[in-house]
Image (cartoon, helix red, strand yellow):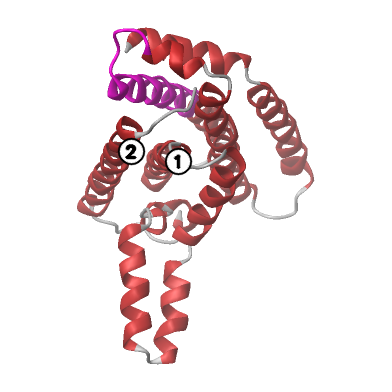
Amino acid sequence: MINIALNTFKEIIRNKYLYMIVFFWLIFIAFSIILWKLTIWEDSKIIVDFWLAMIEIFWLLWVLFVWSQLLFKEVEWKTIFLILSKPIKRYEFILGKILWFSMTIFLITIFQSLLFLIVLFIKDINIDSLIIWSIINIFFKLEIMLSIVFFLSSFMSNMIVVATSFMIYFASHSFSTILDLVNRAWNVFVINFVKLLQLIFPPFEALNTKDIIWNFSNFPFSYFALNSFYSIIYFCIIIYFTVIIFSRKKFEN
């Protein structure tokens, strides 16, 4: 499993999308500095919103485009046969891949968060507890999206995985709006169907605390603990089904 994780790291380093995302990330940092100098609005809100959005969006794109390619290339280039011909079980292959990717996401999130907190300190902006929780929730979002991309990659092609993952991501942020619309229709079947979908889709609305920073401050710790626990369980369930599908998958030589 460790060898698979190390091999995954080498594949990530060689991936052109990673360097493209890092390049644009640096461009946006430079742009944000210029924006703070020119804006007539309250810069504390802009800094917090911009950095949190940047952490989430850029590395969401990285998860979608880099990871969806990795598993696809293993099958397309037939290297999967070489790996599975060795004394290694399929679940070890899956867990080894996702272990390193998860560690990479964790380290990247830590690095960007430290830069973010340093900027807040320099700008003398109050580091609200919701800011810390928003960073943690972004990490959970990225991990869940990683598991979803992994799951879809086990039976879908590369571009379909990316498109489907995008739809899942945006739909999972919109259930309160969707429920509000269907409640006006007074159709019990449709309402219950949407509520069922809300249970199946990832809990991104509950994890989207970055939108309420400085607007609310009386959230109980149990709210964040419950969402964190639910996110971990959701992640594990998706990985479990991924292992089952991948273990039964037949590869054509």
Q: Nearer the viewer, residue 187 or 217?
A: 187
Query: On the picture, is 32 further left or further right than 123?
Result: right
Q: Amino acid at mark 2?
A: Ile
Kindly report the distance in space between the C-alpha atoms of the residues bearing marks 2 and 1: 8 Å
Disc number at residue 113?
none
As drawn, 138 above or below 207: above
- Does dot 1 land on a helix, a strand or a loop? loop
Going 36% across and 55% down the picture, which residue do you hit?
Answer: 203
Residue corresponding to mark 2: 245
Going 60% across and 34% down the picture, which residue do you hit?
Answer: 65
> Which range of residues does the magenta coloring cover?
85-111
Query: On the picture, is 208 further left or further right than 16?
Result: left
Tell me where residue 98 appears, x and y as whole percent. Answer: 38, 26
The quarter of the displayed image where residue 16 is located = top right
Find out whether the residues at labels 2 and 1 contact each other: C-beta distance under 8 Å: yes
Residue 214 visible within the image: no
Tell me where residue 85 appears, x and y as whole percent. Answer: 37, 11
As drawn, 199 above or below 97: below
Residue 81 visible within the image: yes
- Does dot 2 land on a helix, a strand or a loop? helix
The quarter of the displayed image where residue 132 is located = top left
Which quarter shows the N terminus? top left
Q: Is residue 110 magenta?
A: yes
Residue corresponding to mark 1: 155
Q: Is residue 214 magenta?
A: no
Q: Amino acid at mark 1?
A: Phe
Q: Within 10 Å of the Cα at label 2, are there few (<14), some (14-19), or many (20+) other Cα atoms?
A: some
Tell me where residue 51 appears, x and y as whole percent. Answer: 58, 40
Tell me where residue 56 appears, x and y as whole percent. Answer: 53, 41
- How many marks the image carries: the answer is 2
The quarter of the displayed image where residue 194 is located = bottom left
